[in-house]
Image (cartoon, rainbow, N blue to C red):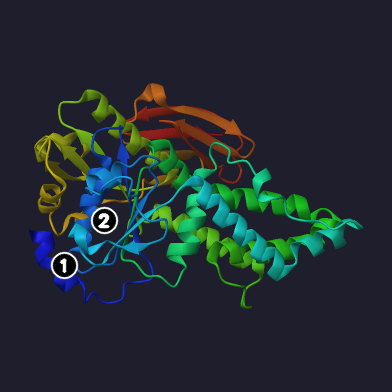
Amino acid sequence: ARSQQRTSAAAAAPKASSSPIVVTTVGKGGVGKTHAALALSISQASQNKRVLYLSTHADASPEYALQMLPPTRLPTTPTAAAPELGLPSTLFLQRIESTALLDDAYEEAKKADADFGISTAIKTATNDSANFELPKKKTIPLVAGMDPWLLLGYLLRRVIHSDKYYDVVVVDGLSTTEAARLAATPVRAKWLSERARDEVKASDAGRIVLPTVEMAASSVLTDNATTGGNSDYERLRNLLDDAADLVTNPKRFIGVLVTQAGNAAASDAAARAWGALAIAGAPCGAVWMRGGEEDDGEKFSPLVSIATAENASLSDLVATVPDSFLDDAVSTSVPPPLEVSSDCLRVHLPLVPKTDVKVSLSGSEVVVEACGSRRAIPLPAGRSKVAGAKADNNVLEIKLE
């Protein structure tokens, strides 16, 4: 009822900001992540906000939750919710698939090749008399682990840096591992780009190709051609910095843990999800407790907690969500702190069992692994070894020498 009362007011919603907050629900399968994501989306759209709900589900879970009659599926482009669904007019729905993300990225690469002449640059650099061409789309495999890279590129290109504006983007259907990889992708991409650049610059051919590739890469990430100013490498680094800020800034990214009262496996999965996101550097701000009381969320303090009835309908879930829920989650959430001193690294690992933590040294970086997630931390100047590590009170302390 509350949603329907606000629908007419939402129709006159102002233009949203250009920097939406991205929300993703994580936890054990079957505990209600999709219902939670939809309820949050509808609740936010009912408050005069432009909201994009992105489903990565292969199945029709969101469609069934919205009572859309099969074989109807969510649209593959952002589309205002159909009036017959009784949803706010500022709620946009979209279903995205891995193959579609790969196709989108491939088409952008083709455009960049045409605009900036990557093929020509490579041909010139290698003195290749044959025409160099990008690989055919059908020859590019969709390998495991590629999804987070494709999704992040899509978010940057089609949502964050596009001419479409949203206040909130809710991403539903990611596993905990995929959400953690999504959060870790920008830092990893920046690390790879810096090392690859050093290697490529070492060759004559690389020096010819590199500026063209960097210009094209920055264009692909933003769907806009380079317009002067900083060098293309600096622009690409700035874009990767912005991507990293997107998934580590609590004003731009929030993880919502979803669990179920009385379900030990669900509670453990939510705790591991919090740890996995913390390792990746992404903030969590709330816990959604299905079939319990708000006090049941004390384990996840200081996260904001919301409790819902066990078998509540979607409309009942929407009515349960306080208007201030997302604002409270943002204000409560802080990026998992990483403290770096000359001889010590301190990493916040909420609810992560000591036995799950692995610390190793890889070149000039300390690698921390836990809950299926990993993080590489550069060694401070003058340090080259790990002297020892200790986990206590949700903090991992790594001694260096």
Q: Nearer the viewer, mark 1 or mark 2?
A: 1
Q: Image height check: is 9 above or below 298?
A: below
Q: Which residue is mark 1?
A: 7
Residue type for callout 1: Thr
Secondary element at tag 2: helix
Q: Which residue is mark 2?
A: 330
Find residue 210 and report its horizontal and vertical position in percent: 74, 60
- For the point 23% across and 74% down, the residue is 13
Q: Quadrant of the C terminus?
A: top right
The answer, for residue 24, to whether it is visible in the render is yes
Residue type for callout 2: Val
- For the point 61% across and 55% down, the residue is 106
The crowding category of the residue bearing disc 2, from other C-alpha atoms within 10 Å (few below 14, some 14 to 19, many at least 20), is many
- For the point 24% across and 50% down, the residue is 38
Find residue 197 and report its horizontal and vertical position in percent: 71, 54
Total marks placed: 2
Q: Quadrant of the N terminus?
A: bottom left
Q: Image height check: is 235 above or below 398?
A: below
- For the point 39% across and 37% down, the residue is 175
The answer, for residue 149, to whether it is visible in the render is no
Find residue 77 and report its horizontal and vertical position in percent: 41, 60
Left or right: where does residue 237 sit relative to residue 326?
right
Left or right: where does residue 279 sit relative to residue 378?
left
Q: Pointers 1 and 2 in contact (CB under 8 A)?
A: no
Q: CA distance from mark 1 to mark 2?
A: 25 Å
